[in-house]
């Protein structure tokens, strides 16, 4: 086998030590899982924003709140976060309004708590798997670096039994070790970019939720005081 064949990518993977191969396999699995979560989160956020746009359009078009509530309650499992917040708040508002002796202040406090609880659940749903992307982005380079250090250490240990050391003796070991670093970066960079992008999008959606809750609270406040 010539030098070019010895330094081919497949040959380096096959001839790497067991620990380096294990690290490469781990990084490859992390990379595949990261891309799975990236595409999944991309579709989830895109769908969420579309559903929220559609609901806000219906809400501010002057539709009857009771009709919107009935629609939201019947489509609870396929609606967006904004519609679920509306449904939870209006359901609590109607329940408290029916109770005799309830003051407007108590009604609104209960309504806000119901919307805030749903808001938190929706945020948790949108942020699901972001922690994995953050962990993959921060840890993968160090895992790859560990594989590189181990591979280089083995390459230089192999020189102990060689009378005359040349670059040809250590080149395969160093090359296979550097592949671990490259794979660590390959797994980390998309995860970090995706995490920052999705975190920003989710922050914008959360701000939209909070703005809607304030505006909806003002509408219900007028009805509670009437």
Image: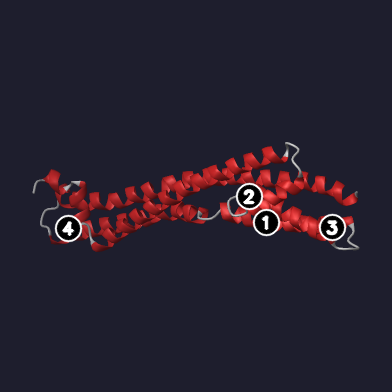
Tell me, for residue 118, which label it has, or none.
Answer: 1
Q: Mark 1 or mark 4: which comes first in sequence?
A: 1
Of 56 and 64, the residue lying toward us? 64
Q: Residues within 10 Å of mark 1 (few under 14, many from 20)?
A: many
* Residue at mark 1 to residue at mark 4: CA–CA distance: 64 Å
Residue at image location 89% in from the left, 63% down from the top:
100
* Residue at mark 2 to residue at mark 3: CA–CA distance: 24 Å
* Residue at mark 2 to residue at mark 1: CA–CA distance: 8 Å
Q: Mark 4 or mark 3: which comes first in sequence?
A: 3
Where residue 171 appears, x then y in whole percent?
A: 19, 49
SS for dot 1 = helix
Q: Residues within 10 Å of mark 4 (few under 14, many from 20)?
A: some
**Residue holding disc 2:** 81
Tags 1 and 4 touching, CB below 8 Å: no
**Residue holding disc 3:** 97
Of 56 and 170, the residue lying toward us? 56
């Amino acid at each position: 086998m010539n030098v070019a064949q010895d330094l081919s990518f497949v040959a380096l993977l096959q001839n790497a030590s067991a620990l380096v191969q294990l690290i490469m396999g781990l990084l490859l699995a992390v990379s595949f899982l990261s891309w799975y979560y990236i595409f999944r989160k991309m579709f989830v956020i895109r769908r969420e924003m579309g559903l929220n746009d559609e609901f806000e359009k219906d809400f501010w078009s002057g539709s009857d709140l009771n009709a919107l509530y009935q629609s939201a309650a019947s489509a609870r499992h396929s609606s967006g976060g904004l519609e679920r917040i509306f449904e939870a708040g209006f359901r609590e508002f109607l329940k408290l309004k029916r109770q005799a002796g309830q003051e407007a202040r108590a009604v609104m406090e209960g309504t806000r708590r119901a919307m805030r609880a749903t808001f938190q659940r929706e945020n948790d749903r949108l942020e699901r798997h972001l922690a994995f992307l953050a962990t993959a982005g921060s840890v993968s380079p160090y895992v790859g670096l560990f594989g590189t250090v181990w591979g280089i250490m083995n390459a230089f240990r192999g020189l102990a039994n060689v009378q005359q050391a040349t670059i040809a003796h250590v080149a395969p070991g160093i090359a296979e070790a550097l592949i671990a670093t490259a794979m660590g970066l390959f797994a980390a960079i998309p995860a970090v970019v995706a995490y920052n992008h999705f975190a920003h999008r989710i922050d914008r959606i959360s701000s939209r939720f909070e703005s809607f809750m304030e505006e909806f609270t003002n509408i219900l406040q007028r009805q509670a005081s009437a």
